[in-house]
Image: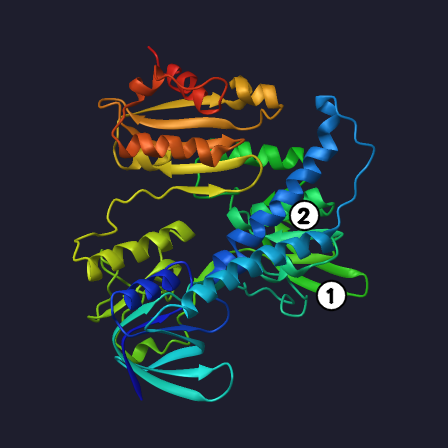
Amino acid sequence: MKHYDAIVIGAGQAGSPLSKKLAGAGKKTALIEKKWIGGTCINDGCTPTKTMIASAKLAYLAARCNNLGVDIKGFKVNLKEIKKRKDKIVEHARNGSQEAIEKTKDLDLIFGEARFTDKKTITVKLNEGGEETFTADQFFIDTGTATVIPDIDGLQDSGYLTSTTILDLEKIPEHLVVIGGNYIGLEFAQMFKRFGSSVTILERGARIMAREDDDLAEEVREILLAEGIDILTGVKLQKIKKGQKGLTVKLIAGKDETQLKCSHILVAAGRAPQTRSLGLDKTGVEVDDKGYIKVNDKLETNVKGIYALGDVKGGPAFTHIAYNDYTIVYRNLIKGEDLNIKDRPVPYCMFIDPQLGRVGLTEKEAQEQGYDIKVAKLQMEHVARAVEVGETRGLMKAVVDAKTKEILGVAILGEEGGEIMSVMQMAMLGGITYDRIRYCVFAHPTYSESLNNLFMTLEE
């Protein structure tokens, strides 16, 4: 039974860098990974999807370039070549990360599935065969989440796709049905529509993007509808039947029963923590009713010396949050700092086109928290840069404190929305009030320049 100072379970965007830092600080460390280095982000999340979205954007631009006076006679989407490019980029990132880990002194990389057999003991079912047992003084869990598969009659026999398996398609689906109207589902829906599929989104809620403000969700809905994507909300799936000519989806929409035929189904109805096989009951580590590991503000569980980082702990499920988790734990344990996750900003970007960049409070959240607010809104059709490049879809929106003029939250739905949002995030972190941004000098003509115009809408 080999003993380590630290064992990291999961080689995601928190686990991988943390393991290297722990080893670099002189701790004998093991990194346990059951599949691939890099976690969801590199392998079946950010890197591959944004690579394919870039191809979809080019198809979209080619289809509408005549609007800008450029005549393209025709084009063809080659999904096999798109996949080939995606795989090359993913493998480069994955292999680079693995090589860096393997070169790190005092760090052992072990491929296998870990489960706790005691409070500070794990047994690893090795990918190459056999089992090994290890003990450690500290454990860091970064096992992430996986797709939730809803209990729908016939779904298991339908050959459904997930956000992982859809990345391996080499033939464009004739008609893709997306179950779920949130971030993952919307990105894939628009991507495959631009590749040439017919696409239908099925959302059980009253509208898509339930966590966003109504006006923003409606703006996104209009953008997707304009591209020819069908969106059905308030639906309940009854049954899926597989036939020789494809799939039949039976559902209830309002009070009416109906059905639609499709060739492929993508399940994008949420994710769940990968904790069921960890054997956490052997440790005393507490989880919530959904299986997410409970942690304090410094990411330590109720069991001293056992930490959880990234998506597995619940809360915002973003790569950059997982990475920030790593930096907090590392700096606290190795550098002796006193950092926590309270009140940190949670920026994010949904890479539909145009992008949605968000940080801070939504209008609804600000109202619920009792703020006296003002709301600034500017349609992208009034942004000079957007008009010049021919991309006027979307809007800018900011929620501010009417008394202090503090910026509480920002949503930018537009070309380069994530970059514009990041400008506003820096302003929020620096305590810059909206009235100062109103008259700030920005380079012309940029998207960020229109932040002047956005806050001029608040002039009395």
Residue 242 is labelled as: 1
Q: Amino acid at mark 2?
A: Phe
Question: In the figure, is residue 378 to the left or right of 236?
Answer: left
The percent coordinates of residue 435 (x first, y second) are 30, 18
Q: Quadrant of residue 439?
A: top left
Q: Residue at x 50, y 81 (%)?
A: 127
Residue where numbered disc 2 is placed: 192
**324 or 148: nearer the viewer:** 324
Residue 177 is labelled as: none
**170 or 291: nearer the viewer:** 170
Q: Count neighbours of disc 2 (C-alpha within 10 A) and say few if under 14, some if 14 to 19, many if 20 or more.
A: many
The percent coordinates of residue 368 (x first, y second) are 30, 37
The percent coordinates of residue 81 (x first, y second) are 72, 53
Q: Is residue 203 in view?
A: no
Q: Amino acid at mark 1?
A: Lys
Q: Earlier in the sequence, mark 1 or mark 2?
A: 2
Q: Quadrant of residue 32?
A: bottom left
Question: In the figure, is residue 380 to the left or right of 120?
Answer: right
The percent coordinates of residue 457 (x first, y second) are 40, 15
Compared with 35, 203 (above or below) is above
Mark 1–mark 2 Cα distance, whole angstroms, equals 22 Å
The quarter of the image holding the C terminus is top left
Question: In the figure, is residue 177 to the left or right of 436?
Answer: right
**163 or 440: nearer the viewer:** 440
User: At numbered mark 1, what does the secondary structure look like: helix, strand or loop?
Assistant: strand
User: At numbered mark 2, what does the secondary structure look like: helix, strand or loop?
Assistant: helix
Question: In the figure, is residue 275 to the left or right of 22?
Answer: right
**385 or 458: nearer the viewer:** 385
